[in-house]
Image (cartoon, grey):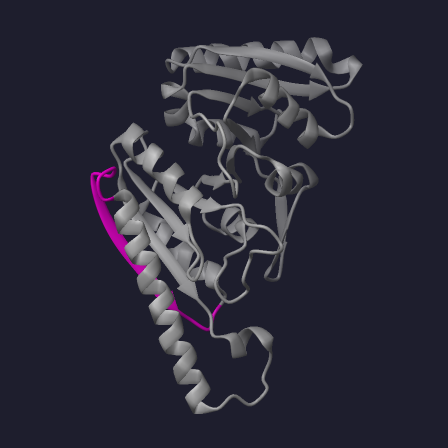
Amino acid sequence: MAYTTLMVQLEAGRANTAVLQATGELAERFRAHVVGVAVCRPMQMVYGEAYVSGELIEQEKKQMQAEVDAAEAEFRNALQARATGLEWRSMVMFAPMADFVVHEARSVDLLITARGTKDSLDPSRGVHVGDLIMQSGRPIFVVPPVLEDNTLDRVVVGWTDSREARRAVVDAMPLLQKAAHVVVAEMVVDAEFANAHKRLNDVVAWLQRHGVAAQPLVVLSTGDDAKGLDAIAEEQGAGVIVAGAYGHSRLREWALGGVTRKLLQHADRYLLVSH
């Protein structure tokens, strides 16, 4: 497996500097083709069924198109010298915006998106990360709003003996194979220390057979595993956390588990998550 095709989701109407910088680094590292996507939703669909004049609708349509065009220009300017090839896809739609991004992700290996914040996520422009995680069937590389010393060379894998964690490690394999330092960490209660060491030794041996020289690390859980995992990454100088994303669906409301949600809300480093 390799990341031959990346997709980056941009938010129209805002600067996308951090997510494009991360995409450029990944594209150079994997000599990848990059697909850029942006999607908008008319405001009257976001805020209700109140009457909106035809003139206002037309003005909004022109504004959205101008913002999408600006996002495409930002995408091409940032990545034209860093990727092996570029494609651009955009849509103004009335359906949930995540649907467009998820469908377009059918031909990519890794979907890159910005973490966003409650203050920055425009309901007519921004796509919720949780929707992408739960629906796309692809690993999601989440970029924090501000990049500091986020290196791709040092990675911490948050391990639990679960389907989601196993899936995440497989999906992260190309990244792990190119990393200089990989730690597989599990946080457990006292009674599980011996079993955890056995589990991690198995995982590390398996990674070794795939060319990844990983180190096992068992840590006593303090009850907040998201905070604990971030602390481990800080201690290891890791720029990336790899983790399984836990969640479930109910109608069209996507709910993520507590650890995943906290990592997405607060982590100041890259996250590669897979469901």
Q: Position of residue 93 (x, y in %)?
A: 42, 71
- The residue positioned 64% from the left and 43% from the top of the image is 261
Q: Is residue 94 on the magenta stretch?
A: yes
Camera-nearest residue between 175 and 269: 269
Going by the image, does 77 lie left or right of 93?
A: left
In the image, which residues are magenta? 80-95
Where residue 45 sits: x, y (%)?
A: 53, 76
Residue 183 vertical position relative to residue 141 in the rendered view, above or below: above
Q: Residue at (40%, 19%) from the top-left corner?
A: 179
Residue 76 in the image: state x and y as whole percent. Answer: 26, 50
42 and 131: which is toward the camera:
42
Number of callouts: 0
Q: Is residue 200 magenta?
A: no
Q: Nearer the viewer, residue 139 or 41?
A: 41
Residue 128 visible from this viewpoint: yes
Left or right position of 211 against 143:
left
Snapshot quadrant of residue 226:
top right
Image point 43% across, 66% down: which residue? 40
Q: Position of residue 159 (x, y in %)?
A: 59, 24
Left or right: where 173 falls relative to 187: left
Q: Is residue 137 visible?
A: no
Compared to residue 150, the image places residue 255 above or below, namely below
